[in-house]
């Protein structure tokens, strides 16, 4: 993970400086707390060579200092503490809905392969996989507003004051993102269940006259779930990326909207630290997925010893 984080830090540092526009010129016009552009550049530390700026930023990260916003002078950590819970809540709720939708429909489709239910569920999954989330999100906002006079709340509802209202505010964007993420889970679950159903021990269980529910849930599902868990690591990364779109559409004050603001204002420290935190979250999820294999399949622990 350490070499990957170093590579990500180098890439995001370079990419941010390739974006057209000079942040000092923008800030001088709007804020102008220095006598000249050169003085303002020196105050922000942007007069140093690029490699020195990178090393200074990297050294601050190693000391736990993520820097300050160029515009607000607030620390990145304080803004992360405000925005990260919103992004995590939206992402985790989306993943939970993706697992429920993909797992249940994948198992249902595999039980009666090539039947009407299987064809219908696969067609719906392909539709959810093909349609862009930003388009579905736009429709979910525009159509109810036109025909029902309803529009989502643009102010974040406090979870302590109104738990149900807070959950309801996240439910629609999480459902849109979750159905998109759940489509590959459904297809993987169906494929792995069909493969497990062809195994000899499953045929033996059927021959013994065991109940269908017991054969599916106890014997087949546990052996089919490992590849599905693998794809969840990939879906988690997509959920974090998709949360950017959903947060902008539904006016949720999370890391995604903060990331857009940082790009628009050329806020180097904010953008760099946000992307690095997102990369760390994705790597942590992939590590958790690897560790989950040991809990799901005891044979892996035996092979490890």
Image (tube, rainbow, N blue to C red):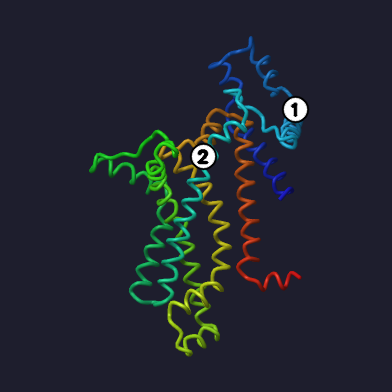
Which mark identifies residue 49? Answer: 1
Query: Residue pushed farthest top?
Result: 35
Between 157 and 75, the one lying in front of the other is 157
Location of residue 121 in the rendering, given as x and y in whole percent from the top left corner: 38, 67
Location of residue 215 in the rendering, given as x and y in whole percent from the top left corner: 48, 79
Asked where in the image residue 27 lies, by quadrant, the reply is top right
Q: Secondary structure at mark 2?
A: helix
Asked where in the image residue 64 lies, by quadrant, the reply is top right
The residue carrying mark 2 is 256
Q: Residue at position x 69%, y 24% from top?
A: 46
Query: Residue pushed farthest left?
Result: 147
Location of residue 9 in the rendering, given as x and y in whole percent from the top left corner: 68, 41
Q: Residue at position x 49%, y 72% from top?
A: 191
- Are there few (<14), some (14-19), or many (20+) residues within 10 Å of tag 1? few
Location of residue 254 in the rendering, given as x and y in whole percent from the top left corner: 50, 38
251 on left or right of 275 = left
First-in-chain label (1 vs 2): 1
Asked where in the image residue 50 lies, by quadrant, the reply is top right
- Are there few (<14), some (14-19), or many (20+) residues within 10 Å of tag 2? many
Q: Quadrant of the C terminus?
A: bottom right
Which mark identifies residue 92? Answer: none
Q: Secondary structure at mark 1?
A: loop
Query: Residue pushed farthest front?
Result: 160
In the rendered view, would you say 209 is above or below 22? below
């Amino acid at each position: 993970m350490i070499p990957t984080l170093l590579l990500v830090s180098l890439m995001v540092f370079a990419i941010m400086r390739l974006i057209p526009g000079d942040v000092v010129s923008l800030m001088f016009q709007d804020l102008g707390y220095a006598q000249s552009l050169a003085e303002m550049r020196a105050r922000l530390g942007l007069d140093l060579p690029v490699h020195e700026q990178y090393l200074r930023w990297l050294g601050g990260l190693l000391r736990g200092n993520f820097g300050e916003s160029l515009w607000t002078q607030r620390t990145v950590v304080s803004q992360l503490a405000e925005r990260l819970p919103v992004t995590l809540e939206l992402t985790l709720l989306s993943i939970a809905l993706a697992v429920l939708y993909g797992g249940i429909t994948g198992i249902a489709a595999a039980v009666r392969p090539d039947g009407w239910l299987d064809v219908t569920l696969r067609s719906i999954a392909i539709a959810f996989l093909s349609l862009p989330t930003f388009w579905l999100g736009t429709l979910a906002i525009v159509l109810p507003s036109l025909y029902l006079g309803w529009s989502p709340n643009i102010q974040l509802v406090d979870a302590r004051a109104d738990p149900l209202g807070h959950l309801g505010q996240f439910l629609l964007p999480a459902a849109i993102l979750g159905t998109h993420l759940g489509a590959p889970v459904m297809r993987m679950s169906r494929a792995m269940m069909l493969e497990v159903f062809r195994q000899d021990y499953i045929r033996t269980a059927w021959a013994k006259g065991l109940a269908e529910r017991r054969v599916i849930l106890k014997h087949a599902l546990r052996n089919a779930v490992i590849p599905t868990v693998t794809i969840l690591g990939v879906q988690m990364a997509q959920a974090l990326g998709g949360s950017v779109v959903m947060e902008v559409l539904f006016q949720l004050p999370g890391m995604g909207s903060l990331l857009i603001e940082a790009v628009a204002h050329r806020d180097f420290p904010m953008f760099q630290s946000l992307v690095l935190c997102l990369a760390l979250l994705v790597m942590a999820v992939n590590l958790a997925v690897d560790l989950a294999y040991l809990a799901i399949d005891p044979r892996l622990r035996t092979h490890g010893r």
